[in-house]
Image (cartoon, rainbow, N blue to C red):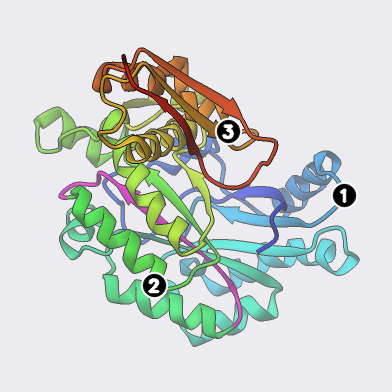
Amino acid sequence: MPVKRNIIPVFIPHLGCPHDCVFCNQRKISGQTKPATPESVSGEIRSGLLKAPNGDTQVAFYGGSFTAIPAAEQEALLGAALPFLHSGAISSLRVSTRPDAIDGGVIERLRRCGVKTVELGVQSMDETVLKMSNRGHTAEDAEKAAKMLKAAGFELILQMMTGLPGDTLEKSLYTACSLAALAPDGVRIYPTVIIKDTRLFEMAKSGEYCEHTVDEAVSWCAEILEVFKRENIPVIRLGLNPTDDLSAGEAVGGAYHPALGELVYAEMCFNAEKKLIGDDARDAAYVEFEVPRGRMSQAVGQHGKNRRRLHEQYNIKQVKFVESPASDGEIKLINIAKNG
């Protein structure tokens, strides 16, 4: 998958969704209330092209289960984008869908209509979590669909969630390992957010569901990202994209934070820093880390949180971070000075 790609999003909230997942209200997540039409698709693309810089530009259909809507409607929506594809104004198309809405006929249609990338909303590979979330598909469906799409030559993006009903850190790590084994071209991770007018909102009010907090999501995701990092699988999104509706109160609980990704990467840095110093730095007078260029804010932590935690947990008098000229590589421990 290209490192940098311009995306023109077209939202089709809830179209094709055969089930109401307990956590989902796509109209509030996307900020879109009207269903997409071929005319609106053309308008969205024209508008998007005015803002998109030159380069690899992809039109992406988000927010519903694209391949579960009637075939004629799929072709009409994709057909509205094809003139832009054939003229070279855009380079490719992307659709998001569910694992049980992929078969040979669907794959043939997507290929014929110019689709290059398919995102599968897997969410979990634990059967209990899938049932409690009313997903309506199995882990086996996800594995089968992913393998079919890869074999057919599509770019594959897999989505997972953390903190769904019945979920645990161990189950989320199992899901991450299972998705990594499918060798996707990218992954999105969405910690669960409690949104108004969802079944999950009612479950939380009744005590049937325990909130997946921001702190918990950050801790879990820091471990989950290590799974994908080991396999060189890019995580292209961490957390829901902030919208005016969500920020204004539609997100009433759970792991909603406008900078969730930064918090997670800072937590990964903190874990790396702890591993580097071990017990050698306890009660030290001075500890110094070298940080790859561009990652200083993550290494130090939001509002200096990582530095502060190292002080508190290891009784280190001074923690210093210096920036490396290189932008790649890992955090390095370059100096420890003992007291006395």
> Would you place residue 338 above or below residue 58 in this image?
above
Task: Identify the residue under disc 3.
Answer: 295
Asked if residue 128 shows in the view, the reply is yes
Q: Residue 98 shows which numbered tag?
A: none
> Mark 3 or mark 1, which has the lower sequence index?
1
Residue beneath the point at 58% across and 26% down? 322
Contact, CB < 8 Å: mark 3 with mark 1?
Answer: no
> Would you place residue 15 above or below residue 274 in this image?
below
- The spot of residue 143 in percent (x, y) is 36, 76
Secondary structure found at label 1: loop
Amino acid, disc 3: Arg
User: Which of these two is toward me, 105 or 324?
Assistant: 324
- The spot of residue 251 in percent (x, y) is 37, 27
Q: Which residues are magenta?
A: 153-166
Q: In the image, which is nearer the foreground, mark 3 or mark 1?
A: 3
Task: Identify the residue under disc 2.
Answer: 181
Q: CA distance from mark 1 to mark 2?
A: 35 Å
State yes or no: residue 280 in magenta.
no
> Mark 3 or mark 2, which has the lower sequence index?
2
Residue beneath the point at 24% across and 35% down? 212
Task: Identify the residue under disc 1.
Answer: 54
User: Which of these two is toward me, 110 or 32?
Assistant: 110
Amino acid, disc 1: Asn
